[in-house]
Amino acid sequence: MAATTSFTPYWRAVGAPAGPNSWVFFVVAQINGRHRPIAVVSSVGDTEPEESIQGYPLTACCRRIVTIFADPSNHAAIRAELALAAGYHAREGDRERSLEPVELLEFNRFRTTTRNRRRPWDRTRVHEFPFIAACLLQGVGFDAQLGRTPPVRPEPLATVYRDTSIEWGMVVVDITELDVVRYGIVGFNVSKAKFVPSREVERRPVGVGAMGPGVFEPGELRVMDDVRPRRPMSAAEYMAKFNYEASAYGNAGELLARIPLVDEAAMSLVWPPSSEDDIHPPLSADTHRTFEEDQVITRLVRATTSDLEDFDMSIFDEVRAIPNFQDLLRHSLIEHSDWLGSAPLAGQLIRLAFANHEHLSLEQLEGLSAESMSAVLEVSEMEKITSISLCIDSIRSTPAQLVDVLSRADTLREIYLLQSPTRENDAPSVQFFEELAARPQILSRANVMLAGAYSAALRQAFWLPTVSNSANAAQLAPLEVFPVQQILVRHQLNPSGNIKFDHDYVYLGDGLLKPEHFATGFLLYLSTLMPSDDDIFNSKAQLFSFSSGPASLAADPLSSARVSPILAENFALPIWLPHSSANYWPRMRDLVPGGWTVIVSQEMYRNSESYYIRYAFIRPRHQRIMIDRLPRESPGQEELEVVGLKEFLSATAPEVDPVVIDRRLHEVAEKLASGRPYWRPLPPDVEPLSVLNQAEAAGILLDFLQDAKALNKRLREAMKESPEGEFSSLTVS
């Protein structure tokens, strides 16, 4: 009798294998010896693959994220938040901050409906590191090349990825070295499968349907890779593993080929080996300092604070020869900042720690005052300082007192006002901006980053108080610095007959956009603008073009992305409500002589699926144009100034090279003319991008003024229905 061979039960695929349907994105950095999560964003896939970030769209997300974090214009703010992260993760004793792992919701791509996949936005959680989180959110949520806007949602820092998930894949971006940002993709094959317990069952034939073997065979979704190596994939490896087709228009894979991959250590905390493992190990020692040298510096700092009446800074002369003396001194000041009670003493020690530096990184120092900051900044030896970062939650002085000191520091060109990762609200950011707005010369001279501006948008909340149209001021942000009030966008809905337009209202007063940065975002917005009836694209996320546009008009829009505050008022309002088919946009503001409004008209070419854009920058010449007092006829040439982008920049930013403006306008026009990647090309005799004349712009403005009344009515009704919800911060005249 023949010997029988043993049989090992297994799962047999009865459907075509596929890659992850939803993705979680982690930004990590090495802090206290381990790679800690700094920001987490999810993108839940739809039941239809084309509406999920599978294949090329995922690689485009990776490329955009890397572009944002690699842009030097974002590095100072990122480094300041990473410095706060070091303190956030450090605890007394040998254990770090304890965070309970947060599991991602599991879905079944064949059973879970689109409605059940959508989770409400968390409007209460205050994000620990809002600038970095805003960078990640926009990297995932907006493709600057193809204009796609995948669904995005911030997640808690304790979120973890499990390789047993039938829904989720993971992308990890390591920003430990901002000059060498790294990324990696993790995902495994998922398929319908049936359990095969015996050889008899194994011999049964697999059902064959019209679409191939096993398509209609019942089965359970399972991860089919029995061995799941803890190794990241590149974009090319990901595309090959799941047999995705390359994009005919996008080049993200080609650009990512030059970006290094993360190592396994970068994934260890966000991808724990099992749910039982402790993802928060003991803190590692700081290998950049020696105990003996650190003690020497600390004793000297202590010596200077023991006799405030007669301290002598010359006691540091002998130790200045230590190669990393300034690093050690800065660390000692951070650990013992409670000793710095004397303004003169604090000023001298900080000046010593940052001598010959251009950036003052003070966000980790606690208890600083306006007096100590004055002692640092208002001396000739610190004239090299051009930027400063502070944690305003730990400043002992009032916002007015600190802003007064900053206003006298003429060399400052970058000011970063951060808040504690453990704060309860963003109110200090608003208070500081109110003081800055009263001194517009500071905002004009320097770029100011306020953590609350980013944090509020991540909660889909307003961050600046709204100013009613009845008030004298048009907005809190001074128009002489941030001159564009709003954009009025209309989309043509039908190609012929009684032409109708949809109306969008984009408020810019909380985006803090100076003229050139507005222009870079505006051109990116025009080049990716989609018709309003395209459900695949989120018209609010398309506004990320303004808050992550190129750093300058001379920069490549696909390889440069300077992050500024998300347009919070637009982002906070829902596109629509379940019981209403109407869209909800911020209310239209009165037009004032000191501010500009931009009109954008996206129009169809005859009966074809081709679009061209006409636009204009407008402003009243003399009198305010009021929403609640409609003019009887369109404003005339003597009442309304109408110009193009070049003329606008000539008036507001004359330092911008007109040749560069022309080049960028030509590039946008070429892209619009091609129709790629979604529309048909325009005929050669149709101008793809042009400026409205005065009569055309005035007529469209009158149309918007009339439509704005209906918008305000919708907003008032929504405020009554949801007084504590999305509309609670609105002011509608």
Image (spheres, helix red, strand yellow):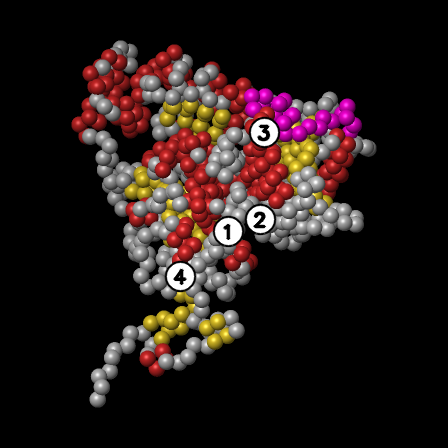
- Which residue corresponds to the image point at 71% horizontal and 46% vertical from the top-left? 605
Q: Which residue is mark 2?
A: 677
Q: Camera-side residue: 263 or 475?
A: 263
Q: In which quadrant will I find the N terminus?
A: bottom left
Q: Earlier in the sequence, mark 2 or mark 3?
A: 3
The tag earlier along the polypeptide, 2 or 1, is 1
Question: Which callout, 3 or 1, points at the residue further toward the start of the chain?
Answer: 1
Where disc 4 sits, the SS reads loop
Q: Which residues are magenta?
A: 635-657
Describe the element under mark 2 as helix, strand or loop. loop
User: In the rendered image, which residue does mark 1 sit on?
Assistant: 247
Pinpoint residue 714: horizontal percent, then vertical percent.
69, 45
Instruction: Please tell me whether mark 4 or mark 3 is closer to you in this view.
Output: 3
> Are dots 4 and 1 in contact, CB under 8 Å?
no
Q: Residue at x 29, y 42 (%)?
A: 34
Taking 587 as reference, is 520 left or right? left
Helix, strand or loop at label 1? It is loop
CA distance separating discs 4 and 2: 29 Å
> In the rendered view, would you say 554 is above or below 193?
above
Q: Residues within 10 Å of mark 1 (few under 14, many from 20)?
A: some
Q: Are marks 2 and 1 in contact (CB under 8 Å)?
A: yes
> What is the distance, in whole Å, between disc 4 and disc 1 at their CAs?
22 Å
Label located before the other in sequence (4 or 1): 4
- Residues 13 and 701: in front is 13
Q: Which residue is mark 4?
A: 189
Q: Are marks 4 and 2 in contact (CB under 8 Å)?
A: no
**What residue sits right under mark 3 in the picture?**
661
